[in-house]
């Protein structure tokens, strides 16, 4: 899932707005500017410097509600990274109160709710963020990922379509749409999306894994094994690639190799066989 700061974290008020505020106030407020830098995530060593900087800004009682909204949002993102979801949600609530037209904290609160397992509230927040900003690609991606987990593949596909329309250079979104097409059995579309993702990011283990799944569903065992080999070279702990390769080996008659891969995958992810069964691969 993708949290947004003022575009300074992973996938809001635009970063230019924050930079304009910083430039305007820098000369008169050197110490505060330092806190703003921290709050905006300049120190990437851990979440703690960002929490400290944002807390100092909030305690300064700034009379600019947009600055405070950014500070609460950014501190919420730091708490989310730390797994402190209740504190993060409280900060996002404050940010939304201060600037109701700021879509970022709605998206980010949705991420915190999703991580807590509160799926309905997460979807409601992504809906609200998209309503405020129909060009908010990351909110579409976040909502699509929830639909994927719910098994609502058609809705997920629509959201990935919109995200790609807005962010055509994002290999992650092309890969996720590839995976969705593959699960739906739209295999040529899946191959086209995976190939595009690999064109944009040639060394992505998850995309080789997605294309391997597609080749499994096409019964092209050799191509599937080659892609799963590539995925495992890049990420040896990727259980789905290990299981998929085992599945393909069994189909080619390599019982020893196939069973070894499947057993190894199940030590990492016990329910991996059930997942593949849901994909139509028994």
Image: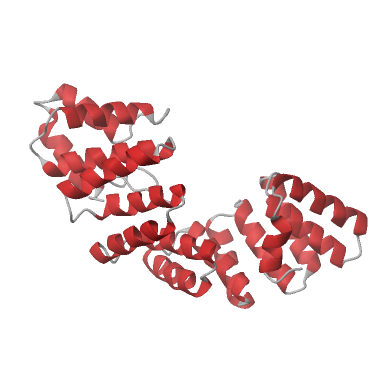
When the figure is inspected, residue 37 is found, relative to residue 162, above or below; the finding is above
- Residue 14 is left or right of residue 122, and the answer is left
For residue 68, what is the image quadrant?
Answer: top left
The front one of 137 and 73 is 73
The front one of 213 and 150 is 150
- The residue positioned 7% from the left and 37% from the top of the image is 63
Question: Can residue 90 be seen by looking at this rendering?
Answer: yes
- Residue 151 is left or right of residue 120, and the answer is right
Spot occupied by residue 22 in the image (x, y as percentages of width and height): 17, 36
Spot occupied by residue 172 in the image (x, y as percentages of width and height): 50, 57
Spot occupied by residue 134 in the image (x, y as percentages of width and height): 28, 66
Which color scheme is applied? secondary structure
- Residue 35 is left or right of residue 193, and the answer is left
- The residue positioned 63% from the left and 62% from the top of the image is 210
- The residue positioned 46% from the left and 72% from the top of the image is 155
Quadrant containing the C terminus in the rendered view: bottom right
Spot occupied by residue 176 in the image (x, y as percentages of width and height): 53, 62
When the figure is inspected, residue 184 is found, relative to residue 26, above or below; the finding is below
When the figure is inspected, residue 205 is found, relative to residue 19, above or below; the finding is below
When the figure is inspected, residue 209 is found, relative to residue 49, above or below; the finding is below
Question: Can residue 212 be seen by looking at this rendering?
Answer: no
Q: How many marks on residues?
A: 0
Outermost residue, top side:
31
- The residue positioned 22% from the left and 31% from the top of the image is 36
For residue 5, what is the image quadrant?
Answer: top left
- Residue 116 is left or right of residue 256, and the answer is left
């Amino acid at each position: 899932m993708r949290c947004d700061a003022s575009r300074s974290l992973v996938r809001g008020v635009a970063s230019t707005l924050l930079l304009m505020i910083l430039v305007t106030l820098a000369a008169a407020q050197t110490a505060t500017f330092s806190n703003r830098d921290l709050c905006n995530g300049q120190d990437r060593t851990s979440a703690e410097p960002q929490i400290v900087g944002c807390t100092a800004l909030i305690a300064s009682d700034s009379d600019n509600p947009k600055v405070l909204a950014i500070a609460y949002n950014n501190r919420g993102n730091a708490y989310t990274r730390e797994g402190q979801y209740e504190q993060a949600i409280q900060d996002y609530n404050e940010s939304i109160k201060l600037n109701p037209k700021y879509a970022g904290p709605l998206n980010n609160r949705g991420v915190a709710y999703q991580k807590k397992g509160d799926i309905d509230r997460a979807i409601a927040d992504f809906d609200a963020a998209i309503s405020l900003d129909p060009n908010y690609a990351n909110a579409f991606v976040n909502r699509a990922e929830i639909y994927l987990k719910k098994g609502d593949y058609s809705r997920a596909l629509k959201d990935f379509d919109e995200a790609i329309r807005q962010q055509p250079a994002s290999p992650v979104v092309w890969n996720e749409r590839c995976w969705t097409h593959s699960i739906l059995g739209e295999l040529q579309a899946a191959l086209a999306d995976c190939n595009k993702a690999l064109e944009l990011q040639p060394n992505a283990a998850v995309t080789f894994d997605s294309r391997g799944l597609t080749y499994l569903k096409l019964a092209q065992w050799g191509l599937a094994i080659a892609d799963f080999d590539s995925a495992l070279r890049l990420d040896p702990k990727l259980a789905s690639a290990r299981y998929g390769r085992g599945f393909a080996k069994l189909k080619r008659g390599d019982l020893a190799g196939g069973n070894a891969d499947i057993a190894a995958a199940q030590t990492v992810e016990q329910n991996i066989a059930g997942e593949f069964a849901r994909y139509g691969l028994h």
